[in-house]
Image: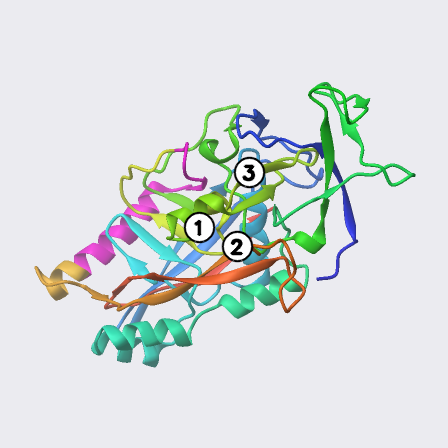
């Protein structure tokens, strides 16, 4: 990855998560608090395909890192021609697999194994990693940090007020600095239970018409609880946090119904602008499924699908690729709709 060796980001170490963090960050003057995105969906039935356009407000003033990730991926074209890979009446999960008509139809006409095979052959993971490695995606999660040193090579310590003190001073903390050598491809979870983030005007709850960033944490609870990373909620703060809350990459959920997800443990970063357009889309899909399948299932269940999760290396040393993070496979089961629901494109219409 082509970055400067060390970013100009310095903060007092904050190992406790009970740290109040303002959601506001310094932003370029040309950026709006609420950029907009236009998502064009396509509902494919046989040889007939109908497009639906939904406009969304993205809440950069509340969730700056999440919205930045979504905008960067959208502008790269990453989300274009992706498919809803896991379907329920309440949530549609997307952003991980591409759509290919013939292969999709063959998969839903087959068995669980053919569905899983489709996912394996249409994963966008390598495309995502290429964007990250080429510096097209801004990091917000780090496997480790460095300590700031003075001109003599001594570690710099500060007290609770940020005043430089001797390291032996009671309550002194070393000053950490971020190095891009430790950058991970995952995204910081901007919600209260992760970094105690307080949203000035009230966090968004998951209601119909929401966009939610989706997290695939390691399923091994013991491993996940031991895996810690450093996150950067603002430009002048570094916090140590649990990796499982900072594991998002590119997948997100389109909320179609009510949800029990709380703003305390989920990042809802966008809202649909027209509920009428959303309802028309939802109703057309629901009507088709009811007419075509009745009481029969209109989804095809996959056998186990391997999902890649990213973690810091356990020994703190770089892996064979020189990265300080490693990968592990976890297994998920998806319900693929028998009729493809495709995202044709995601365009940022207001930056």
Location of mark 3 (residue): 34
Considering depth in this image, is 113 or 270 the residue closer to the camera? 113
Dot in front, 1 or 3: 1
Location of mark 1 (residue): 223
Q: Residues within 10 Å of mark 3 (few under 14, many from 20)?
A: some
Q: Return the residue found at the far left.
A: 295
- Report the Cα–Cα distance between label 3 and label 2: 32 Å
- In percent of width and height, residue 33 lies at 59, 35
Q: Could you tell me which secondary element the residue under label 1 belongs to?
A: helix
| Mark positioned earlier in the residue sequence (1 or 3) | 3
Which quadrant is home to the N terminus? bottom right
Q: Which residues are magenta?
A: 263-288
Q: Give the answer, above or below, for where 193 lies relative to 47.
A: above
Residue 235 lies left or right of residue 251; in this view the side is: right
As drawn, the label of residue 311 is: 2
- Report the Cα–Cα distance between label 2 and label 1: 10 Å
In contact (CB < 8 Å): disc 2 and disc 1? yes
Q: Residues within 10 Å of mark 2 (few under 14, many from 20)?
A: many
Q: Give the answer, above or below, for where 105 lies relative to 89.
A: below
Residue 178 lies left or right of residue 297; in this view the side is: right
Q: Residues within 10 Å of mark 1 (few under 14, many from 20)?
A: some
- Report the Cα–Cα distance between label 1 and label 3: 37 Å
Q: Return the residue found at the far front.
A: 168
| Mark positioned earlier in the residue sequence (2 or 1) | 1
Q: Could you tell me which secondary element the residue under label 3 belongs to?
A: loop
Considering depth in this image, is 222 or 86 the residue closer to the camera? 222
Residue 274 falls within the magenta-colored stretch: yes
Dot in front, 3 or 2: 2
């Amino acid at each position: 990855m082509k970055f400067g060796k060390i970013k100009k980001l310095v903060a007092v170490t904050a190992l406790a998560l009970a740290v109040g963090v303002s959601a506001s960050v310094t932003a370029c003057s040309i950026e709006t608090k609420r950029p907009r995105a236009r998502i064009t969906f396509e509902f494919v039935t046989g040889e007939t395909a109908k497009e639906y356009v939904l406009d969304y407000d993205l809440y950069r003033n509340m969730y700056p890192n999440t919205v930045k990730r979504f905008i960067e991926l959208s502008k790269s074209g990453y989300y274009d021609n992706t498919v809803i890979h896991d379907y329920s009446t309440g949530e549609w999960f997307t952003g991980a697999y591409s759509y290919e008509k013939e292969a999709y139809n063959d998969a839903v006409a087959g068995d669980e194994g053919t569905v899983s095979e489709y996912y394996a052959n249409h994963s966008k993971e390598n495309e995502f990693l290429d964007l990250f490695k080429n510096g097209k995606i801004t990091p917000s999660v780090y496997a480790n940090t460095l300590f700031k040193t003075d001109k003599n090579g001594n570690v710099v310590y500060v007290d609770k007020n940020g005043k430089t003190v001797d390291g032996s001073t009671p309550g002194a903390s070393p000053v950490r600095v971020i190095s891009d050598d430790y950058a991970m491809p995952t995204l910081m979870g901007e919600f209260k239970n992760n970094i105690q983030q307080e949203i000035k005007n009230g966090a968004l709850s998951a209601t119909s018409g929401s966009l939610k960033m989706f997290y695939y944490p390691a399923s091994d609870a013991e491993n996940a609880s031991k895996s810690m990373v450093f996150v950067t909620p603002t430009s002048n703060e570094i916090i140590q946090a649990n990796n499982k809350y900072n594991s998002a990459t590119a997948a997100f959920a389109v909320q179609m119904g009510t949800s029990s997800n709380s703003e305390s443990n989920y990042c809802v970063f966008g809202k649909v602008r027209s509920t009428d357009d959303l309802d028309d889309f939802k109703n057309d899909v629901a009507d088709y499924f009811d007419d075509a399948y009745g009481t029969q299932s209109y989804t095809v269940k996959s056998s186990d699908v391997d999902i890649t999760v990213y973690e810091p290396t356990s020994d703190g040393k770089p892996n064979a690729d020189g990265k300080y993070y490693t990968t592990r496979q976890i297994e998920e089961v998806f319900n693929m709709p028998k009729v493809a629901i495709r995202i044709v494109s995601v365009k940022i219409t207001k930056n």
